[in-house]
Each structure stands twice: as structure tokens, then as C-alpha cells.
Image (cartoon, helix red, strand yellow):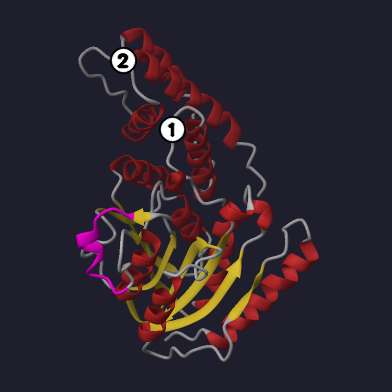
Amino acid sequence: MALNPKVEPNLQVLGQTIALLQEDMDLDYFDALIETGDNLLTGEIQVEDGHPKPATVAKLQDLYDQVDLTSLAADDVRLLVQLLILKGYKQEVIQPNHQMTPDTIGLLLANILTVIFRNHHQLSLLDMGVGTGNLLFTLLNHLPDQDVTGMGVDNDDTLLTLASLSSQLQQVKVELFHQDGLDPLLVPAVDAVVSDLPVGYYPIDEKAEKFATHNQEGHSFAHHLLIEQSLNTLKPGGVGVFIVPAGLFQTPAGLPLVKYIQQVGYLQALLNLPQGLFGNTQARKAILVVQKQGGNAQQASQVLLGDFPEIKNQDEFAKFVHELEAFLVANVVVK
């Protein structure tokens, strides 16, 4: 994706404001990013207990006067915030599950949702692990022909604050819920659930045991439980589109997950993403498309399995995407 040349000057200036706030207020990178975002949104530099100092306030004001977001489209602002967060990843220790979904994958999911809901003018969309919101905002910014209600759930308050900041700077309306995605959800039933699912074991066995996909011994996989929770949250005939480990169903725990999906819904597609997007084979991920029973939903005559070609093979990649679109039109029917 080509970067709007107007993004870079804003990136440099805001990077300087973050560094000034870090030094003056003894903040870590992400707290300083949140602070500078609040200053931008309020139009006023927040001073508490004498910090930032007057000299720093003067420098900050000069820098904020150089920031121009009005000439940027919402998705350019999203990219700006994304790049600022990525700079923070170089300074702070980040859990692997907190890494942002690459834009290439986000755009693929946007295309899938566009095709599936091509006849719908209104759409409710929930991200089950919204994090900083980058995936959700990519989808919202690339579903322009629909009135989309965007929602996100996450249990990390810093990530949710960054998501809220990004949404306000983009002027994109979303509802964000600070809660464990495996607690009873505060959100209504939705047309679509998306998520770049956090991979690993869920530590609270007592809570996991309430789900059909929990492991009989030891901890259960969080991503399995979240798929089940998502299916529970979908409207009849609703669709879940998830980023999952490429070997999702190749473990002993994968069989109960398949059985559960078949009990309440339909497994429509599992497509391995291009290997070149990942550092090694073990890190490779796939796109999983499932549909809840009800409405006009039906099982595809044959589950679509396959591997995306490498993106550099543009003709092959475009052909595969076209075949995927044709499959979705023919097999994934929603009201």
C-alpha cells in the first residue's frame, strides 16, 4: 500500500512530541503516545504537577502547530497511528499476541466481508481481540458502501486506549468494551465476527470448562474458546472470519473444535496465507471462514481448502482471490 506523502511529516513531528513527553514526564513510549494523542484531541497540552515543564510545553505547542490531520483520509490517519505504534514496538517489550495484523491480511479480510455481505447496506461487526484496533479500522475504512457498526473487545486497557485514540483521530465511530472475551459479552448479537486470534493457552481452567471446546486435561487453547464464543455471538446465518494458526486442525485438540463448529455452524473455508508474510513455517497463519446455522446458511458442497500464492506472484495471487470470491458468492449465503 502506497503511503500518502503527507503522512511522513506528521509522523516525524509526532515522534518528536512523544520523545519530549517521555523525557519530561518519565513515561514509557505508549503512555507518551496516549498523552500526545489526548493533547491533539483536546487542543490543549495537559499539565499536571508542573509537568510537562513550561519550556517543554512551548516546544510541544510549536510541534503541534505543525501537525495537519485535516488533509488526511481516515485510513491515512490509521496508518499514521499504526506507524507510531510500530515505533513503540522497537522500544518496549511486546507480547507476540499484541503484534498488529499486517495490512495485507486486513485488506484480504475486507475483501472477503465485502463479497459475503455485498447485498447488505447495514452490518454489525465485532473484533473479538481488538487490541489497538488496526484490523478493525482497516475493515471499517474499506467497507465504504455499507453502514457498519464496529465493535471491539479486549482485556488490555492500554491497547484499548490506543484503539480509542486512533478511532477519535480518524473520526471513525466504534464501541470498545474492556473485558475478557471469554466472559459473558456486553455486545449484542452481530452479523460478523473477525479476529486475529490470540494463540496460546487460556490460564483460567474454571472458566474454560464452561466451553465445549475446552481440553479435558490441562489448559485449553484460547483461540479455540474464542471461536466458540464468536459463534455464540453471531446472529443466525452470521459469519466469522478469523486469522488462525495454519495447523489449527492438526492437533488432538483440533478435533473437538471441528465437531463443535459442525454442531452449530458450517466450516466453509480454511486458506493458508502466503508463507512469505511469516518468518518461518511454524508461524504461518490461515484465514478460517465459518458460518452459524440459521437464516439462509448452508454447508458448502465442498469446503474450500488451499494456499494463497505468494503476493509477488501477482497473476497467480489475483487468480486465487478471484476464485475465492466466486466460491463465497456461490456458497456463503446470508440474509
Residue 28 at what x, y percent from top left?
Answer: 37, 25
**Crowd rating for badge 2 (residues with CA inside 10 Å; few <14, some 14–19, many 20+):** many
Front-most of residues 92 and 64: 92
Which residue is under mark 2? Answer: 52
Is residue 118 in view from this perspective? no
Which one is in front in this view, the residue at disc 1 or the one at disc 2? 1
The image quadrant where one finds the C terminus is bottom left
Query: Which range of residues does the magenta coloring cover?
Result: 202-212
Q: How many marks?
A: 2
**Crowd rating for badge 1 (residues with CA inside 10 Å; few <14, some 14–19, many 20+):** few
User: In the picture shown, does residue 129 fall above or below 146?
Assistant: above
Disc 2 on helix, strand or loop?
Answer: loop
Mark 1–mark 2 Cα distance, whole angstroms, equals 25 Å
The amino acid type found where label 1 is placed reads: Val
Does 258 sit left or right of 247 as displayed? left
The amino acid type found where label 2 is placed reads: Pro
Rendered image quadrant of residue 236: bottom left
Which residue is under mark 1? Answer: 93
Front-most of residues 160 and 300: 300
Identified at 42% across, 41% down, the residue is 95
Identified at 53% across, 61% down, the residue is 142
